[in-house]
Image: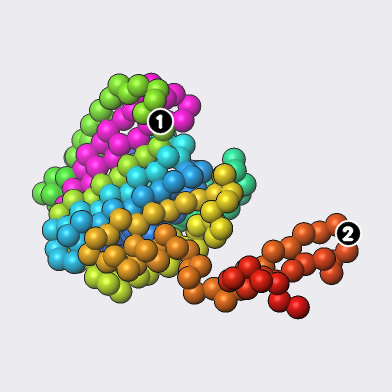
Amino acid sequence: MKTSRIRFAPDILRRLGEELNPHPSYGIIELVKNAYDADAKNCVVSLSNVDTTGGTVEVSDDGDGMTIDQIEQGWLVLGHSQKLKKRCTKLGRIPAGSKGLGRLAALRLGRFARLETQPRSNASDAYRLSIDWKMFDDASLIDDVDLEIEHVDRRPKDGHGTTIALDRLRDRVGRVEVKQLARAMLLLADPFGDDKLGFQPRLVAPEFADLEKLVAKRYFDQASFHLVASYDGDPRHARVLSDQAEEIP
């Protein structure tokens, strides 16, 4: 008797990436959701020259980060996610990201993908991993490509979190896609910005300055009213204030 196993050609990566990522914004949104799921307070999405092919996207957060085991057993295992084993994060957030395949769609947006992460559990360690997708395209099987996880010494004051950079984008990210991204960031954000543990995303996109401001303002410039309520046992004790802080009867 001879035993064997199912193996995958690199073309499966391309097909999955295209089918799961009909629009580039979906992949970037998935990376933002991963930052949210990692209990990050701050997440910065930087877009550079994305209005044409060959641009760069960087998503940086101050979340939990990853250990080398989490990179090997989680981040690099496509189609599997530890999120399935827990309903809420330590901060009580309901995980928003997909089951691992969404990450593949995101990472395939560019020719190069780079991961830099520093775990919250060990602030003195950090890890770096670079992926050149052409190495997979030229290989016969996915298993033929080795990826090196580099250990990088960091000082505790450098903090914790993860940065993912996608270079030489295959497709342009136009205004429609950036608007979709901005709206998704707003849906994940703490709407008032007064929760110390809330999610505070920021968009840095010089090519789309108005959408950058939209994420920063959280729609507040379009709000007609600001509702302030307190509860002392009587639900009638609530006030509705106008944008001039005048009470409305």
219 shown above or below 48: below
Mark sitting earlier along the chain (1/2): 1
User: Which portion, as a residue range, is magenta?
Assistant: 109-131
Can see residue 83? yes
Q: Counting other residues with Cα less than 10 Å from the Cα at mark 1, is it few (<14), some (14-19), or many (20 or more)?
A: some
Q: What amino acid does circle 2 point to?
A: Gly
Q: Residue at x 58, y 71 (%)?
A: 243
Foreground of the two, 162 or 110 = 162
Q: Residue at x 24, y 70 (%)?
A: 174
Would you say 160 lies left or right of 96 here?
A: left
Residue tagged 2 = 233
Q: Residue at x 25, y 54 (%)?
A: 57
Q: Position of residue 85 (x, y in %)?
A: 57, 44
Secondary-structure class at tag 2: loop
**Which callout, 1 or 2, points to the residue nearer the camera?**
2
Residue tagged 1 = 159
Q: Residue at x 13, y 49 (%)?
A: 134
Q: Quadrant of residue 4?
A: top left
Q: How many marks?
A: 2
Secondary-structure class at tag 1: loop
* Residue closest to the far right: 233
54 shown above or below 178: above
Classify the position of the N terminus by image quarter: top left
Can see residue 12? no
Q: What amino acid does circle 1 point to?
A: Gly
Would you say 80 lies left or right of 211 here?
A: right
Q: Position of residue 173 (x, y in %)?
A: 24, 66
Q: Calculate the distance from the C-alpha at mark 1 to the C-alpha at mark 2.
A: 43 Å
- Principal SS element in the magenta part? strand
Foreground of the two, 105 or 32 = 32
* Residue 88: mark in rendering: none
